[in-house]
Each structure stands twice: as structure tokens, then as C-alpha cells.
Image (cartoon, rainbow, N blue to C red):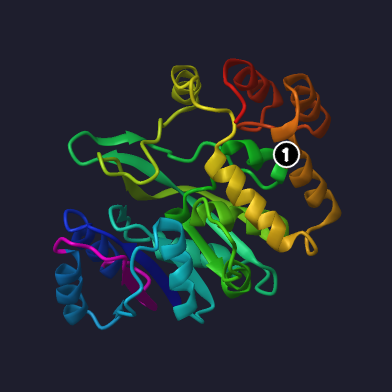
Amino acid sequence: MIDILMATYNGEAFVEEQVRSIINQSYPDWRLLVHDDGSNDGTWAILQQLSQEDSRIVLIEDHAHGLGVARHFIHLLRYTEAPYCMFCDQDDIWLPDKVEKMYHAICSLDPTCPQVVYSNAYLWDATQGIISAKNTLTYPTSLRQMLFLNTGIQGAASIFNHAMCTYLREPLDYYAMHDHILLLSGICFGQVTYLHESLMYYRQHDNNVTGHAPGSIRKKVMLMWHNRHIPLVSKLHYDGLEAFYRHWKKELKIGDKALIEAFLQMAQQTNIQRLASIIRHRFKLFDSTALLIVKFFIRHYL
């Protein structure tokens, strides 16, 4: 059994297409657990109709509203005890074999270890069609590769096991995004695996919560320069990492604890000290210390 966790909010324009793409999955043994964050449009009415068509769609009404994206997904975890879970955004479209392929990928891994498997996604627009064959262009499995990304890997492209769910359920003081915590937990406490196949359409539109993805390394570098007024380190994700560290510092491996501490300390350092720390600890951006140093020189730090 796989529990698919969908957090909705004012998604009436897209949610039916997404849910029907789940109904049409080749792998049938799933439940879609849906929780709404207080929509004031027709989202809930659409979901009620769809739940009458398919009993695997379970609507959760617990009067918890105004959670925000990150806490909304974490909130959904309290309703599952399934061996495997998948996060699901309201506005994407899953290809018919997404669940089946991701399920087979994670089943081949040690179930006693916290596991997260990521697929890729087509960058897609309803009018333009496929913009790029891959949304995810970096595949971090260590903190050195992750911390300067200011993000996690796309949560809606993940499947994770019950052992991982146990870590995600631990309440933190602050969340940047649910996918940020998922990747951090996978790197620090489990195993992160990438399935290099695009299994969903990541819809681009004006209301994307996480912004538009550039779609290629070249475009990401161009965007790096275009957005040079934006800090090197996102305060949102810095605070999320700090909350993660406060909660888990006694359980972290010595090496991971040292890297997180070095990263957090850089906020109080001079630029010369920061540059020395980047080089000493071999921090990377898109698996390149050199690219991170270039970004370091064209942006203010925090």
C-alpha cells in the first residue's frame, strides 16, 4: 500500500486533472489522502465529487487551516501508517507509470533504513507543452552538495518509506519547505536515491508556490547573474536548517554536525572567513565548488 499525500489550497483550476492522473496509474494499490488548507474557491467541491467516483480518495476534514505549504504536508503525515508515502502537489500531472516505477525502485532498497527515492520531471506549460526534459539537474547525496542549494529536491517527485516518515513527523520549530526537510532527513539519517527518469509534468503557471524552474544548467547560471540582488543564502532555508539542527543535533553523525555548524557559523563571519570555510569544507553548488565561489562573488551573503 502506498499513501499519496495531497495538500490543496485554491486549486480548482488544476486539481481535477491531477487527481485523474493518479486514478489512471498503472499501479492500483494506493490511497490518496487529501487535506485542504482552507480554500475559498471550488477545490473542495471538486474533490468531494472525485471521492464519490473512487473510494481510494480519502478526504480529511479536521478543521486545521492556515498551515502554509510546509506544515500542511507535515500535518498530513499524522494520517498515514503505510509502508510507503508520496507527496503530491495539486497542480502537476503524473504519468501513468509514475507510482509503479517509483514503488519498484524503493522496494529494491533496505526497508529498515530511512529511504527516499526521487524521480525527475518534465518542466511543462499547458500552452507551450514540454519546456525541458528534466526539472532536477543536481542530485545531492551529501550535505556538502546540498546546503547552498537553498532548497530540497522536488517533494512531488519523491517516494519515501515508513522509517523516513518517522523522522519527518518530529515537530520542528520552523520549516522552510517540506521537501527541504525530506532531503535533509534522507542525507543525515538514511539513504537518498535518484531514478533518472521524468515521470510527471511539473506545471509552470503564475501561482507556482516554489517559483518557475529554469530547466537547464546554462539557464540556471544566467538566472544566477540576473538575480544577483538575491542573497547567496536564503534566510528561509537558513532558518529551516537551524531548526533542524536544534532538534536533531544529538543524533547527527559527527561529520554532518560539523558541516551544519560550519554553514550556520558563516552567517556571523567576514567574507574572507566565509570563502575560506567554503574551500576548507568543500561545499558545492551543482556539484562544483568553483561554481559556488562564482556565485559567492556576485551576491551578498544573507
Which part of the image, by quadrant, shows the N terminus?
A: bottom left
Q: Residue at x 14, y 75 (%)?
A: 49
Tell me the amino acid under the disc marked 1: Phe
Label 1 crowd bin: few (<14), some (14–19), many (20+), radius 10 Å: many
Quarter where residue 109 is shown: bottom right
- Depicted 5 relative to depicted 231: above or below: below
Kindly identify which residue carries mark 1: 263
- Depicted 79 relative to depicted 269: above or below: below
Which part of the image, by quadrant, shows the C terminus?
A: top right
The x, y position of residue 72, in whole percent, is 41, 64
Identify the magenta region. 24-42
Residue most extreme to the front:
268
Is 52 left, or right, of 92 in this rendering?
left
Q: Residue at x 83, y 29 (%)?
A: 280
Is 173 left, or right, of 122 in this rendering?
right
The x, y position of residue 125, in whole percent, is 25, 39
- Depicted 283 relative to depicted 173: above or below: above
Residue 64 sits inside the magenta stretch: no
Q: Residue at x 15, y 60 (%)?
A: 41
Examine the rendering and report whether any part of residue 1 can be seen.
Answer: no
Quarter where residue 13 is shown: bottom left
Seen from the viewer's position, the closer of residues 213 and 79 is: 79
The x, y position of residue 152, in whole percent, is 54, 47
Seen from the viewer's position, the closer of residues 159 and 26 is: 159
Quarter where residue 292 is shown: top right
Examine the rendering and report whether any part of residue 105 can be seen.
Answer: yes
Residue 27 sits inside the magenta stretch: yes
Is 189 left, or right, of 2 in this rendering?
right
Q: Residue at x 58, y 28 (%)?
A: 232
Seen from the viewer's position, the closer of residues 166 and 97 is: 166
